Image (spheres, rainbow, N blue to C red):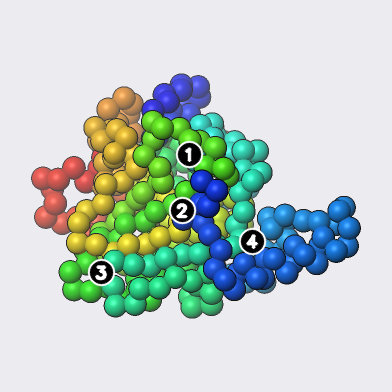
Amino acid sequence: MYIRRRRGWEIPESAATPEGLYFSRRELMGAGAMLAAASLAGPAAAQRVSDLPDPSAGLYPAARNPRYTLDRPVTPEAKSSTVNNYYEFSYGKNVAPSMSRFERRPWLVKIDGLVDNPQELGIDDLLKKVQLEERLYRHRCVEAWSMAVPWTGFAMKELVALAGPKAGAKYVRMETFLSPKVASNQRDFRYPWPYVEGLTLAEATNELAFLVTGVYGKPAPGQFGAPLRLVTPWKYGFKSIKGIVRFSFTDKQPLSFWEEVQGAEYGFWANVNPKVPHPRWSQASEEDIATGNRRPTELFNGYGEYVAGLYAGREAEKIWF
């Protein structure tokens, strides 16, 4: 695991066919037709899939949910879009330049495991089954920096309802795409690709758990985790898996990516607590990436009223790291 120390918030937290990113028959035909039409117009008109209009663009901006408000200004997109952790593509923070080969369409999402309704569906078909809304959330990185973001997406409990968990399901294991040709850092043998994260079923159905497809009133750019990522604002940011292609419901606690890489520093729970320091630095305060100002860190990142009850009786467990 790389450890690079620059500014206060820059302390890292942590084949031909991709395993998690592949074409459904309908999506393949659609993408092929678009590319064929472009190529008929001549070489100069030929386009990559990523250059074509996002088929979900008409869904944005979504109505803002007034229940979720901020105690600080929204971080300007010009800043938040260049401070992202996405180790599949870059070990630095300005990820976008490393994503030139990343395609957001076609994108197939698999739901399996202990469910009544296992299924595979394209991201645009999934979007037809859920209600998009915008939420203003604080984001707290384990590296002790923070930002405030207007996410667009849908409550994770909607996906759980689509799956229909069986009685024995206790956890949701999430997996990102696997494509070393697209994400060059997935060739790095020191890491257990693909990226895996997990939540308890109670966490996944908490009202705050949010599956994100857009940001700043439009479809999310790749560096934000498009076309589907998780946001759990009461947890440290490394729980926010990006580029999700699979949700597996299970009775066993998943071994998450950073837990496997360095379990002494990055555990399964990852709830924000200013009184519990990371093994190598304090979590008592955080740096706002927009202003450079520091503010005290809040328990559960200020979302305790929504989530504290999830952890009642777990006091003996390491629910912070």
Q: Is mark 2 on a helix, strand or loop?
A: loop
Quarter holding the N terminus is top left
Residue at image coords 15%, 56%: 312
First-in-chain label (4 vs 1): 1
Q: Mark 3 points at which residue?
A: 114
Which quarter of the rendered picture does the C terminus lie within? top left
Q: Where is residue 193 in the image (x, y as percent from the top left)?
A: 40, 42
Q: Where is residue 114 in the image (x, y as percent from the top left)?
A: 25, 69
Of the numbered discs 1 and 2, the one sitting upstream in the chain is 2
Horizontal and vertical percent position of residue 153 = 50, 65
Q: Name the residue under label 1.
A: 186
At label 4, counting other C-alpha atoms closer than 10 Å, the crowd grade (few under 14, some 14-19, many 20 or more) is some
Q: Is mark 4 on a helix, strand or loop?
A: strand
- Horizontally, is 284 left or right of 45 in the view? left
Residue 144 at least partly seen? yes
Q: Choose the circle earlier in sequence order: 2 or 4.
A: 2
Residue pushed farthest front?
A: 16
Mark 2 neighbour class, 10 Å CA radius: few under 14, some 14 to 19, many 20 or more: some
The residue to which callout 4 is attached is 218
Please name whichever residue, 96 or 255, is drawn nearer the observer in this view of the structure.
255
* Mark 1 residue type: Gln
Residue hosting label 2: 19
3D distance between C-alphas at marks 3 and 1 = 29 Å
Whole-angstrom CA distance, mark 3 to mark 2, is: 21 Å
Dot 1 lies on which element?
helix
Can you say whether 206 is above or below 276 in the image?
below
Q: Which residue is drawn at 74% across and 67% down?
A: 34
Please tell me which residue is depicted at 40% across the width and 46% down the height of the picture. Answer: 195
